[in-house]
Amino acid sequence: MGATTPAFNSVVRPITISEFREAILATCKPRFPHVRLARPRPIGLAISGGVDSMALAYLFSHYIKTYKAQHIADNPVQDVFAATVDHRLRPESAAEAAEVASNLRRLGLRAFVFPINWSYVLGHDVDPSKQANVESIARTLRYRVIGSFFSTHEVTSLFFAHHRDDQYETILMRLLSGHGYRGLQGINKANSIPECYDMHRAYKSGLVDDQMRPHPFLKFSPAGREMRALRSRLRLESTLPGFEQFRSHLGINDLSARFPGQLQREYDAGIPYLPPLSVEDGGITVYRPLLEFDKARLIATCEANNVPWFEDRTNTDATLTTRNTLRNICKVNELPRALQKPSILALAARSRRRVQCEENEASRIIHRQVAIVDFDPNVGSLLVDLPLLYIGREMRGRLNQPARDEARRVRQRLLAAIITRKMISLVTPDNHLPSISNLGNTVRRLFPYLYSNGTSVLDRADRKAFSMAGVQFEPIPSYKSTRWFLSRAPFSSNFLRAVTTTPERTIQRPNWGSNSHPLPWEAPRDPAWKTWKTSLLWDGRFWIRLNSCDRKKGLHVLPLMARHTKAFKAALDSRERARFEKLLKYHAPGKVRYTLPGIYAVERLHKSQEGSEESERKMMLLALPTLGVQIAGLEQWVRYDVHYRNIDMQLLGKRKCSKTPNMNGFTARISISRKKRQQRMRKVVG
């Protein structure tokens, strides 16, 4: 790398602040449109020191001065933090990072430099530059360092300097790799921060904690002044003539009574009520407002405003990476019109529109046919009634009828794969969802009529349980062939054996007492509580955090194991034991219960036992946090908080009920054509 001296380019026009503002407004859409009040919070910039990121830093430094009250995403801008990661792969990288930070401070930004500790990742005496996947490792560490810093400083909007040329090169590389239209969408303008899937408040989490604060950054309820004005207006309108007739028409005897048409979920009186877990949201969103600008305009912006930058000489070496080779080919040679930048970017835009239309159509099918019967966040289970995908009426003698039918089937199989993928996303413990092309066998099992030439399909007895992406699919017996139960796939015996030997440590390990009581230590008169531990993502599904008294006792979060259930029940009183058994039977039937997290106390091994493979740690189950069941007296020593990971809540917007609730003035109707269509499809399914 070397510093570049600005030389003003009068041919290409620099980016103006008004253009940058339009790009910000188009890119940074509000994530929570129903927010009533938002406190100012800082934003973050990822600055490498190149011309792209330095142009982004300059534009933001003038943007916040020109538009002081402007919102970015959901919050007003309080400050701008610029983070530079020193990868330490070159001897001069530390000096360059310090120079970049100095240039950023001259622009009025708060600059921070974070060096990467390679010895902590790869071990001592290991040269990272000689690693084959050093670029992948550096990318992961870069995102995690940035995510950790910005989540600590309450930053939820992070900006990168990807531009139009980066978009063009990315799509060309994917096109050469043989990707289909789903892989040719290019770089997203906005997405959640990658490589930080297990970091709380960084990846799709943190909103629940924010709402528990006395003064949250986002407030969804009306302000006190607005509520007082609303009550005053209601009292005033209650004195107006005609209000008594209006109230009698609605059947309201008291202003504080519930609205008669309000829908409430019905619960079985014989099953204990279990409050549903809160679903996480929030986290850091990465925005790329410069995707509509060419790199030449970014260079012109820096040159016109005397902004220095560092040029990485490795970017010009055509033999180093595939991207460099492709960049050199595009610069030296004149490509065919179909491979030039306007055509490739138009191809990406068409691909994005096509994918978005398919995703929207799949969501409409889920909502229209009410495919989501029930979702239980306390267990992570899903009951679905698979939608019926209309293939079309068979018309004999029509020209090219077989080809028409096959084209419809291919389209419906694609929609079925997208629907299956959306359902898997609610339950799977994996960070990445399976691709559409890998769901062919799953769709064949769930929608067999889409692969049948006739009207006969697989019989109900032929439906068998299977697993995909960590999700167990189980058909519901004695019911129509479209209802399935989705839950987390059971843990393997090797995994349970490994966590039993070396359990996941969330706090310090305990000293096991000889007393048979579940809590052998004595409670102090004034227990000193530690601060809450950072929430950990357990099994990719539950965010769990613990708080314990200031003692040398420790806790571990492990799956519920059958051999510990009997002792756990014995430690409960009779009433709590009956409640526990009913909760397991209703919410976690069969093997589903053994995928739930449990809080254990684990014995510390002696030095003489650490080397033996047969030794197994002595454990005691203390609580099942997602079910709210714990042994008596645990609250004196342990506090826990559990939330379900972020999911697409729009898929749960409409669910089936056991019986249709009665609403005054409303009668459910369905058109004759749609009714006949559904009857025909049910005959096809069997």
Image (cartoon, helix red, strand yellow):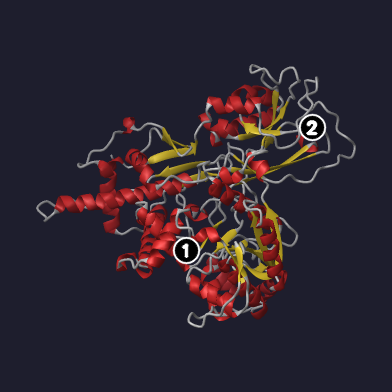
Residue 55 location, x and y as percent?
58, 71
Residue 326, quarter of the rendered image: bottom left
Q: Nearer the viewer, mark 2 or mark 1?
A: 1
Residue 84 location, x and y as percent?
65, 60
Residue 273, quarter of the rendered image: top right
Residue that appears at 56% across and 28% down: 495
Quarter occupied by the N terminus: bottom right
Closest to the observer, 455 or 403: 403
Q: Which residue is mark 2?
A: 553
The three-letter code of the residue at mark 2 reads: Lys
Left or right relative to 479: residue 219 = right
Closest to the observer, 239 or 489: 489
Q: How many residues crowd around disc 2 within 10 Å: few (fewer than 14), some, or many (20 or more)? A: some
Q: Reply above or below: 567 against 376.
A: above
The secondary structure type at the circle numbered 2 is loop
Residue 80 location, x and y as percent?
68, 68
Q: Is residue 39 visible in the rendered structure shown here? A: no
Residue that appears at 26% across and 58% down: 673
Q: CA distance from mark 2 to mark 1?
A: 52 Å
Residue 45, quarter of the rendered image: bottom right
The three-letter code of the residue at mark 1 reads: Asp
The single residue placed furthest to the right in the displayed view is: 525
- Count how many numbered circles sit on residues in the image: 2
Are discs 2 and 1 less than 8 Å apart at CB? no
Residue 682 location, x and y as percent?
29, 45
Q: Which residue is mark 1?
A: 166
